Amino acid sequence: MQLGKRKLQILQAVIDDYICSGEPVGSRTIAKKYGMGISPATIRNEMSDLEEMGYLHQPHTSAGRIPSDKAYRLYVDKLMKTRMLTAAEAEYIKKIYEQRTAEIEKVIEQVAKVLSDITNYTSVVLGPQLNKVLIKRIELIPVDWQYALLLVVTSAGIIKDTIIRIPADVDSGYLNRVSNMLTVHYRNKTFAEVDINSIQDVQKEMMRQKEFFNSLVDALTESIAQKEQTEVYLGGTTNIFNFPEYRDIMKARAFLSLMEQKDLLYSLLSKFDKKGVTVVIGTENECEQMKECSIVMTTYSIGDKVLGTMGLIGPTRMEYSKAVSVVRYVGETVSKYLTSLFEE
Amino acid sequence: MQLGKRKLQILQAVIDDYICSGEPVGSRTIAKKYGMGISPATIRNEMSDLEEMGYLHQPHTSAGRIPSDKAYRLYVDKLMKTRMLTAAEAEYIKKIYEQRTAEIEKVIEQVAKVLSDITNYTSVVLGPQLNKVLIKRIELIPVDWQYALLLVVTSAGIIKDTIIRIPADVDSGYLNRVSNMLTVHYRNKTFAEVDINSIQDVQKEMMRQKEFFNSLVDALTESIAQKEQTEVYLGGTTNIFNFPEYRDIMKARAFLSLMEQKDLLYSLLSKFDKKGVTVVIGTENECEQMKECSIVMTTYSIGDKVLGTMGLIGPTRMEYSKAVSVVRYVGETVSKYLTSLFEE
DNA sequence: GTTAGCACTCTTAACCGTTGAGTGCTAATC
DNA sequence: GATTAGCACTCAACGGTTAAGAGTGCTAAC
């Protein structure tokens, strides 16, 4: 069976209505609200066809219809009208850049807040992925006789700092020499290329403090691993309570528990690293607990290096047009902002 | 009317039972479970007295009794048996110190997680309050031609770092001189003493870069303000769903929204800065939204300088003995750990 | 002072008819 | 042949009634 123009119109009407009401949509409602000069009976016939084709389904015999994930997919790909941001939205988004901070983490944090505030969905932003940036300088700064600060400056302006213990008999001249050596060695490499073997090369050159070098290696590798894992910023997690489908305590709980599992979120979202906006609808999600949610995601970058992922999570009956336009706009402007900050 | 020994026994039985069941406790239950050789009828009489005295109340005529906040207060102050930690609990708490990190924030984060995991309540830990530590050194480290890292090393080993913009014509020698000057000026002062006026003294000495100095002042003051406000670490926020009294979606939502308001939490909890464990029960809370919750809090310190606050939030029918013993133990051991790390 | 007995209260769960929204089918209409 | 009015049918939701159960308070006996 073909999807004629009228079927598409009706499908769109059902989706639009369901997205905003959350209640199954009946033929009468469509005839009245989206009146296109046909009677409820005709609409019923069409809807029956649409159900057979897998675009709609009924929760029970005497209820209206609900769009399936397949319908949302069609909607997002073909039917949806791209929506412009309102002036108020654009204005609100500017908040991100107002503080003019040079710390990428602060920007990201603000992005999470703004995304969820504007859309009333839950926002997730992954921190910059270190494996995609280049190391520019490594520095060891003595803090006191016991500790030093290990500073890694990258091409994205990200400064990864860890405090490490230093042996008592190490002086700042020595730390300086080590810093220089590390910098020479790793300049313009990625974190992935910083492997232990190559560090042992350096170690050979600097036999004097074997033990110290080991702890340095530990700190470097651990700090990379750590950062890679868990930098997940959330916004508006309690927004989920706005949706009647989450009135059920068990569902709300499952959702919020999922949001607490940062590592799971990270592994789910870090996959989407292609540019542009990606929409994952309900059962398209691989993760079992997300089968009733949709994700609208994009990436952010400095220049053309993709740094991380940002997006929205909500029920499958999401206002896709709004979500997509907001996510796209924020993703693009954040990338521009970061590029202007860090790209020479 | 006096609280005789038997009344206390009965009150304790009601509290114990209610804490673990969450259901109003009837006279029969007490006679059976906590049998002290008296009949339900006698217990009824005693309970009636206890109600008159304000220790118990009934949700409705034909229901059992529920302890009032006054009863919990008595329980916590007099009745409660101090409980030892189990071996498993003590073992689990060791996790905090295993990573042997020298970063206080990492420790705090781990504390929040461990507290909530062990107790199944929601944990709140306030980050170290900068106004209580002494500045040891201020350093400006050039990152690239545009940015420098402003590093403040304190007596608590806390390193506050902010990236600031520097003018193009500033060289590293100049930054060094400024660092030294700031360090000399502020060594052994608290953040509260770093005020703009005194900074302007320094500015006079360093007229060459007025503009730069202003941005430095901004960065310093803002970074202090920022840190003071919002360093709140949470653990186990969804634990609240374990309690039947939070089956009600509106209650759960109110609780979780409260937990999202970090600044409110901060202002609520930062008041408790005396040593030892503090318990605030239900309506004893000043904050309206917390009138149905209890807080069990303590402080953590380095040496004898109190740094911050940590604790648990749960329903008023909290397992106080467990909560208090866990919070006390964690507070003490964390303080010891931090002291061993940072105190010379 | 304590307790058995009993009437009373109030919540909770189950049951059941009613209502209303919405469908699918059929037959008439355009 | 597509469209539509009409109608019987289905099913969730709502409200009212009832029965069960938990617990009390009171009274009278121990």
Image: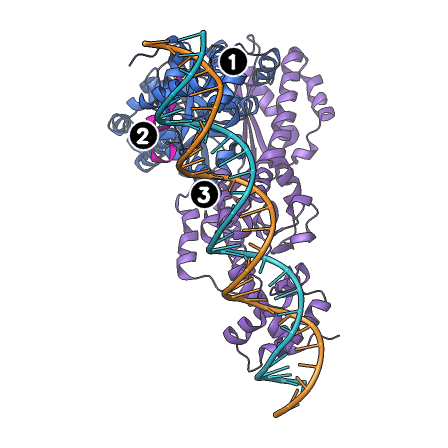
Chain colours: A blue, B purple, C cyan, D orange
A286 magenta-colored: yes
Q: Please, which chain is the residue tagged with disc 3 on? A: A
| Residue drawn where x is 61% and y is 27% of the image | B223
Q: In this image, A151 relative to A119: left or right?
A: left
The answer as to whether the residues below labels 3 and 2 share one chain is: yes
| Whether residue B297 is situated above or below residue B211 in the rendered picture | below
Q: Which mark is residue A250?
A: 3
Tell me which label, 1 or 2, sits earlier in the chain: 1
Judging by the rendered image, the residue that carries numbered circle 1 is A35
Mark 2 residue element:
loop
Res. B223 visible in picture: yes
Residue stretch rendered in magenta on the structure = A275-290
Label 3: state its secondary structure.
Answer: helix
Amino acid identity at mark 2:
Glu
Mark 3 Cα shell of 10 Å, populated few (<14), some (14-19), many (≥20): few
Q: Amino acid at mark 1?
A: Gly
Query: Which residue does the numbered mark 2 point to in the structure image?
Result: A286
Report which quarter residue D23 is drawn in: bottom right
Q: What percent of the width, then of the height, locates residue B89?
A: 43, 57
Q: Are marks 3 and 1 on the same chain?
A: yes
Residue type highlighted by circle 3: Met
Q: Chain of mark 1?
A: A
